[in-house]
Image (cartoon, grey):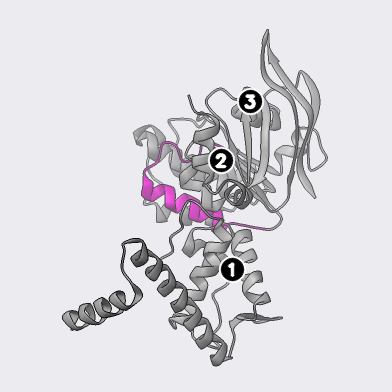
Amino acid sequence: MTWSFTEDRPIYLQMQEQIKLFIVSGVYPAGSKLPAVRDLAAEAGVNPNTLQKALAELEREGLVYTQRTSGRFVTEDVNMINSLKTELAQEQIMKFLKKMEEMGFEKSETLELIKKTAEEMK
Amino acid sequence: MAILECSGLTKKFGAKTALDDVNLSVETGRIVGLLGPNGSGKSTLLKLCNGLLTPSGGSLAINGMSPGIGTKEIVSYLPEQTYLNNWMKVSDLVDFFGDFYRDFNRSKALEMLKNLEIATGDRLKTLSKGTKEKVQLILVMAREAKLYLLDEPIGGVDPAARDYILNTIIKNYNPEATVIISTHLIADIETVLDDVILISKGKLLLTSSVDEIREKNGKSVDAFFREVFKC
């Protein structure tokens, strides 16, 4: 897995999003232990305090939790992870639809085109 | 707690003012970028912190002390120019640092030298400019200091070594220590920094966290710097 950051937004927000992505995609499965802050920071090439801030936000959202002596874990609530997954997918779809609208496609036309393209890719 | 405090710090060289009434407080446990165009006073500030220069006005305290023997024990400084003896072998330099500094972690230095494939039997004068810089930085980073002052640490080394060095800074991160890095290569170190100190023509322009700059301006510190100092 790789980490990348865009220029235009705070790094802690982008860290937060990437960790979410790693959770829904199963890189960090439900209930698993997250790497130590120092290791994760080194891997991503980011400041440990920034990462700490991102993790604190995720904790506030209930997606990760800290066990006092043994570290930080991904939530065991699979429903929560699944609804996050749907939410992230919807975000992408909305972005995509907006882009298609800008190109002059009606929603129905876009849907047709998706079907057709998906079949061609098989 | 503040590890570095400057109040009204001023440095003049004859008629030229290199630093002008700088008020600054740097907290413990931060990684800070000291940024500014050429000749803005970055190196002067770092030299003042090390007692290589004395202030013309105002004051400066490191961990509550004026620069001197007490601060040298807790400050690890990478100057812009090398002062190491060319005839020495890398292993001699490791011994040298070990003799000089109580907080020097020899095994850490040897490990970093190994990771960067620098042979300890080589004499400094046989090494390339970039490799020399790596050796010096390794020696400086191998101390368990409270304050690291790095003057242009990544300018002369290749991108792969740059990544390794920045990684070393992250891995060495310690909530008790602060790292101040002066550089022009902002894009390379931006994600590593907590805060930036922006100086221009000897004056303090801005101190801010990296994410604050990104939040307020919708652009990276690098892009922000280019805009502020557009020629």
Q: Which residues are magenta?
A: B150-174
Q: Tell me the residue that label 1 is attached to.
A: A37
Find the distance from the CA under tag 3 to the CA under tag 1.
Answer: 35 Å
The earlier-in-sequence mark between 3 and 2 is 3
Q: Is residue B152 visible?
A: yes
> Which amino acid type is marked by label 2?
Phe
On the image, the x and y values in percent for residue B39 come to 56, 22
Could you tell me which chain the residue with mark 1 belongs to?
A
Near mark 1 (Cα within 10 A), the count class, few <14, some 14-19 or many ≥20, is some
Determine the residue positioned at 48% across, 62% down: A44
Near mark 3 (Cα within 10 A), the count class, few <14, some 14-19 or many ≥20, is some
Q: Nearer the viewer, residue A75 or B144?
A: A75
Q: Secondary structure at mark 3?
A: helix
User: In the drawing, what numbered circle is on residue A54?
Assistant: none
Q: Tell me the residue that label 3 is attached to.
A: B44
Q: Is residue B16 above or below residue A70?
A: above
